[in-house]
Image (cartoon, rainbow, N blue to C red):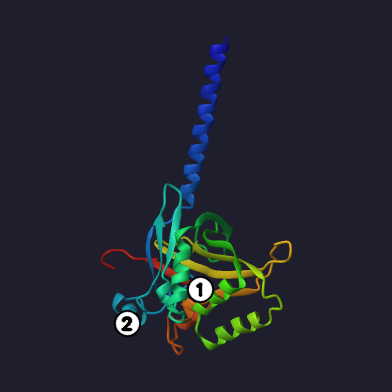
Amino acid sequence: MQIVSAVTAIKQLTSRLLLLATCAVLSNTTFAIEAGQYYYFISDKCVAKGPQTPEERGVVTPDVMLFEVVPAGISDYYVNMNTNALVHYAEEGQDILSSLETEQAYTAGKTPSKDSIRKDGNAIHHDFMLQREALDLKTLINTLNGFSQLQSDKGYFFKKIVGLSNPNAKFKAITRVRLSDMGYDNRMMLTSYTSDYFMLDEQGKAPDTPFIAVDHGAALRGSLHETNSPYGIFTRNTVCGEKWEPGN
């Protein structure tokens, strides 16, 4: 009787494990990404705008790869951002951001969105945590020196650093990327690409508001079109990438 009970228990455990594995696979399929290189195209939240013929689009659309999604196992991915597209950053700043991509954590989820064309009305968000570490003030200054060289941005960094009263301050650095899938085939929205630096208190705790916030996504978007371009309005808050396919 004990042997029969043991065999029954093993069968039940095996069935449960198979069920959990099946659920995991189905969940991962729901949040799957089309891996590949995504290039900028003129759109309003992934709805195509501007000229529609390939010839006309090619004339007004800058040839800029925004990011590349690479599979890393059955349900995992990592992202490579095109830091060279951050044309106002120093080479050192571009290299710093690229180096953060060597170790990253991926998660996915969904939220209701009025911009989604999915049947359930949800947008699927793919989040990549590129950095989560403590920095001293010297490292923070060196990092910021490599970012945007525009006078307005450098002035913002300078004012924040000069206003510090504690030269031994420590900071929590968080750099992350969010890509959002609104249901359009082979299109992915670059929703955010940011670095936030939180000043730690004496107990090593970080506040809710960052001491310095750097929006790399805004820097990238701002350089895609000339100032007087009629298409610049579509890059104010987000940009959309279209997966490159051979022959396109």
Mark 1 nearby-residue class (10 Å; few <14, some 14–19, many ≥20)? many
Residue 59 badge? 2
Q: CA distance from mark 2 to mark 1?
A: 24 Å
Q: Indicate the amino acid at tag 1.
A: Gly
SS at mark 2 in the image? helix
- Which residue is at the far front? 168
Residue 217 badge? 1
Residue 34 shows in this picture: no
Q: Indicate the amino acid at tag 2.
A: Val
SS at mark 1 in the image? helix
- Image location (x, y in percent) of residue 158: 61, 83
- Image location (x, y in percent) of residue 242: 39, 67
* Quarter occupied by the C terminus: bottom left
- Which residue is at the far left? 247
Residue 46 vs 89, above or below: the answer is above
- Among the two numbered marks 2 and 1 on one chain, the one whose residue lies closer to the N terminus: 2
Residue at image location 51% in from the left, 28% down from the top = 15
Q: Is residue 236 left or right of residue 70?
A: right
- The quarter of the displayed image where residue 134 is located: bottom right
Q: Is residue 60 left or right of residue 129?
A: left
* Quarter occupied by the N terminus: top right
Q: Nearer the viewer, residue 71 or 38?
A: 71
Mark 2 nearby-residue class (10 Å; few <14, some 14–19, many ≥20)? few
Front: mark 2 or 1: 1
Q: Is residue 50 left or right of residue 45?
A: left
- Image location (x, y in percent) of residue 150: 51, 86
Residue at image location 47% in from the left, 70% down from the top = 96
Residue at image location 64% in from the left, 80% down from the top = 161
Q: Nearer the viewer, residue 140 or 149?
A: 140
Residue 22 vs 163, above or below: the answer is above
